Image: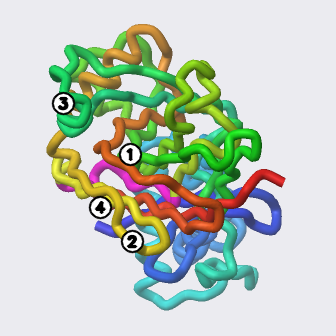
């Protein structure tokens, strides 16, 4: 199976979907064009590729397994044949350092966050494990992508700013009031979210969780069939290369179907929505100038620099 690491990248004509493979970013639509042109000719290859492998992230996710399969065929063909250009001479892959990755979210997506989901949280608080997860929300407008700045609010600095590494579900198919047994049919894949928090200011209401740039997401989305065991993934957070948080999804109190099914009782889940499954606990303070990294095993590492608000 050809692995896909689904990116939202800034192309010359706007944002397009690609896949990061090692140090190269492959444009999935153009890979499909290149592969299809061998069998259908140049004109039909572009038409078919636009139908099979949409260039828009939301359209690609909505197309489900058909788009994923076609993208895998095209990417595999290009890699196997060492192709560098499309049928009309356009570049089909780029050096990672020369490409800007955007947050892998769709416009107006819901960012739904789960809290009190890890055994470690209850242990740290000296409390009983909860009967159900906490649920809160972040606006899509506070999302930033990989390598974008996290902005430390100047009116809050130097009070503590903390983090959480969170395995995050990406919805592929719409639904509401979804039974736990059916949830996996609605999941497209997984990404990483860094849940940033202004510690100790819950009296500020949602501002302590939903301030500007408080939700870095990325660097890409991994299809669900590439994750061998979602309940055995290491979670790691680093500040300037130093490991400051460790956890594992084996310590989740609630299953992913349980969490998503509960959310769907009150909110329609739509293609591109993301649901964060909570963080493993114990954190240190982030400082202005730090480089922070949230990593989920088998998914990826989300890196962001931190600066003080201008």
- Marks 3, 2: nearer the viewer: 2
Q: Secondary structure at mark 4?
A: loop
Most foreground residue, 305 or 97: 305
Question: Residue tagged by mark 1?
Answer: 166
Tell me which numbered mark, 2 or 1, is placed earlier along the sequence: 1
Q: Position of residue 155 (x, y in %)?
A: 75, 40
N-terminal of the pair, mark 3 or mark 2, is 2
Q: CA distance from mark 4 to mark 3?
A: 19 Å
Residue depth check, mark 4 versus mark 3: number of the one nearer the observer: 3
Image quarter of the C terminus: bottom right
Tell me the tag on residue 242. 2
Q: Is residue 224 magenta?
A: yes
Residue bearing the label numbered 3: 253
In three-dimensional space, the C-alpha distance between marks 3 and 2, rounded to whole angstroms, equals 27 Å
Instruction: Specify start and end residues of the magenta stretch as a single range.
Output: 219-228
Residue 297 numbered mark, or none: 4
Task: Judge the density around disc 1: few (<14), some (14-19), many (≥20) Cα neighbours within 10 Å.
Answer: many
Give residue 204's position: percent from left, percent from top.
62, 22
């Amino acid at each position: 199976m050809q692995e896909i690491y689904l990116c939202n990248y800034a192309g010359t004509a706007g944002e397009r979907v690609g896949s990061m493979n090692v140090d190269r970013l492959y444009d999935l639509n153009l890979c499909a064009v290149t592969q299809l042109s061998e069998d259908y000719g140049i004109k039909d290859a572009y038409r078919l590729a636009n139908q099979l492998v949409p260039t828009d992230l939301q359209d690609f996710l909505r197309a489900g397994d058909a788009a994923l399969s076609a993208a895998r065929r095209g990417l595999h063909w290009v890699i196997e044949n060492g192709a560098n250009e499309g049928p009309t001479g356009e570049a089909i892959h780029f050096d990672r350092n020369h490409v800007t990755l955007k947050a892998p979210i769709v416009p107006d997506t819901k960012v739904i966050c789960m809290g009190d989901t890890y055994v470690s949280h209850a242990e740290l608080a000296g409390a009983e494990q909860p009967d159900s997860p906490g649920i809160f929300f972040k606006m899509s407008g506070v999302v930033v992508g990989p390598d974008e700045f996290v902005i430390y609010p100047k009116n809050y600095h130097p009070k503590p700013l903390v983090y959480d590494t969170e395995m995050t579900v990406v919805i592929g198919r719409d639904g509401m009031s979804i039974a736990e047994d059916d949830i996996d049919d609605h999941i497209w894949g997984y990404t990483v979210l860094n849940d940033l928090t202004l510690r100790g200011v819950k009296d500020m209401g949602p501002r302590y969780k939903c301030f500007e740039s408080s939700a870095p997401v990325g660097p890409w989305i991994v299809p669900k069939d590439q994750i061998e065991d979602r309940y055995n993934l290491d979670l790691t957070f680093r500040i300037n290369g130093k490991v400051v948080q460790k956890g594992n999804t084996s310590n989740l109190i609630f299953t992913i179907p349980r969490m998503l099914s509960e959310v769907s009782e009150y909110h329609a889940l739509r293609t591109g929505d993301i649901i964060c499954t909570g963080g493993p606990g114990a954190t240190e303070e982030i400082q202005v100038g730090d480089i922070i990294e949230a990593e989920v095993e088998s998914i990826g590492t989300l890196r962001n620099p931190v600066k003080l608000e201008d």
